[in-house]
Image: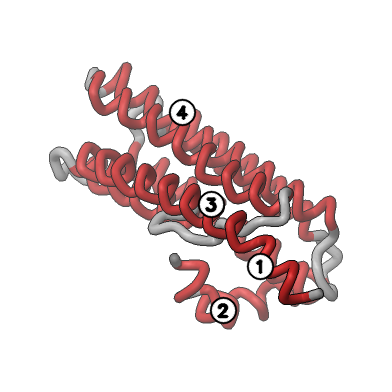
Amino acid sequence: MLNIFARASFDRVTDPVGAWLARSGLSPNTITVVGTAGAVLGALWLFPTGHLVAGTFVVWGFAMFDLLDGAMARATGGGTPFGTVLDATCDRIADGALMAGLAWYAFVVAENLPLAGAILVCLVLAQVTSYIKARAEATGLTANVGVVERAERLIIALTGAGLTGFGIPYALDVAIWLLVVLSLVTVAQRIVAVRRSAAAGPELTEAGA
């Protein structure tokens, strides 16, 4: 949803920075890899050791690199097919590391097995959500809907982790269980969207003929 309603506002902020980085000689792919590496290291080092506040800010900071690589691609005339695949792949790696780090925290530090299980469910649902859209687009269908996409997942999970780190009880529990529900809704929305797109396919073909 943020991609639809807030993307233009973010672009106005990140486009000048992306243009400056592009002029400095860096490539969008370099920013993608650096951002992913930082997010992965932060998530797998800080969350499992109970440093929730530090982990939240580190992962969020490096996740913002995902906005900059897109801005750099626009500044250089558009991205490449390889860059698009690399960006999507790195997003999945960073998302997986975030949930793995939080799950480790829940298992080992908090000793909260229901929370750990819910985090693992979120991990699976995040991958399924992304897969449905990618598979649909590869098949010529559309599934560009959903109440929670990557940005919303990051905001909800990191907000819960950060607030828990600041001493607010059950903040992470509430955030993760909310994310479970919203992710299930998103998966259902995308399956329905694919079904409708497939059903409308022959009609669209005949209209264009």
Question: Spatial distance from mark 4 to mark 2, Cα to Cα?
Answer: 31 Å
Q: Which comes before the other along the chain, label 1 or label 3?
A: 3
Q: Which comes before the other along the chain, label 3 or label 2?
A: 2
Q: Residues within 10 Å of mark 1 (few under 14, many from 20)?
A: few
Pick the residue in front: 99 or 118. Answer: 118
Can you tell which of label 3 and label 2 is closer to the viewer?
3
The residue at 22%/37% (across/down) is: 173
Q: Pointer 4 and pointer 2: residues touching (CB < 8 Å)?
A: no
In this rendering, does residue 128 appear at all? yes
Question: Spatial distance from mark 1 to mark 4, Cα to Cα?
Answer: 44 Å
Local SS, label 2 = helix
Can you tell which of label 1 and label 4 is closer to the viewer?
1
Indicate which disc residue 203 carries. 1
Q: Pointer 1 and pointer 4: residues touching (CB < 8 Å)?
A: no
Q: Which comes before the other along the chain, label 1 or label 4?
A: 4
Indicate which disc residue 100 carries. 4
Can you tell which of label 1 and label 2 is closer to the viewer?
1
* Location of mark 3 (residue): 195
